[in-house]
Image (cartoon, helix red, strand yellow):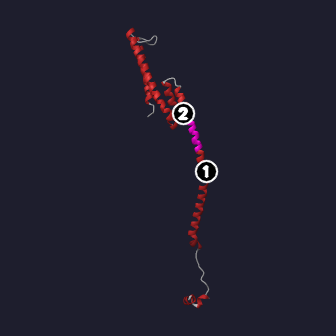
Amino acid sequence: MIIDLTRTYLEPTDIFKEPNLWNFNPDLVFDIFDKFYLRVQLIKKIMETYTEFIKLEKEFLQDYNVFRENISDLDHRLSTIICQAFDDCSGLDSCFRLIETLGNLLERPLIKKTFDKKYANIVHLMQEEVKMVRKMYDEQMLHQKIHGRIQMHKFMPKVSGSLKWAEEMRIRISNFVEDFKHLEHK
């Protein structure tokens, strides 16, 4: 059967003819393949680079974790030192100077968590300062009632001495109130 089919479709003269060779432009035929090959090469380079960087990323993550541990340790130490410095402050003025000097360090999460407890001490010191000024005022008023004038600096006239004393008291309390207002604590 196959032989019969072949004979019907092929002419006996077709077998002995010279074959027709293909005539084509290789640039047209292989252009798409060449582009594909270049893309594959590009992807290969990208993957090689990726592989190299994956190795570096693992190293980087290890180094980053060590760095974070060191920073955390430094934050703990610094927090302890800052709290000790605050506890060693002699008064409200030195507390405010310390806070101003430390600036943004007090915003670091670990330090902030530890130092936030100290703000209650500032409120307490502020209350004590107001009580002290009130006591000084009451003493001066008592002295004025008894002696007819307030205690003032030596060689100061009565009116200007009284004004100077009142100004000193106002400055004393208003400076602390202004510093207290500038505290950034929630």
Q: Residue furthest top?
A: 147
Residue beneath the point at 54% across and 33% down: 79
Residue beneath the point at 47% across and 30% down: 119
| Segment colored magenta | 65-75
For the residue pair 59 and 165, the one nearer the viewer reads as 59
Query: Which numbered disc flags the more N-terminal residue, 1 or 2?
Result: 1
- From this view, report whether residue 33 is shown above or below residue 165: below
Local SS, label 1: helix
- From this view, report whether residue 123 is shown above or below residue 70: above
- From this view, report whether residue 22 is shown above or below residue 1: above
Q: Which class describes the residues within 10 Å of circle 1: few (<14), some (14-19), or many (20+)?
A: few
**Mark carried by residue 56:** 1
Local SS, label 2: helix
Q: Is residue 15 left or right of residue 90?
A: right
Residue beneath the point at 57% across and 37% down: 73
Q: Which class describes the residues within 10 Å of circle 2: few (<14), some (14-19), or many (20+)?
A: many
Q: CA distance from mark 1 to mark 2?
A: 34 Å
Q: Is residue 130 left or right of residue 41?
A: left
| Quadrant that contains the N terminus | bottom right
Q: Amino acid at mark 2?
A: Ser
Q: Position of residue 185 (x, y in %)?
A: 45, 33
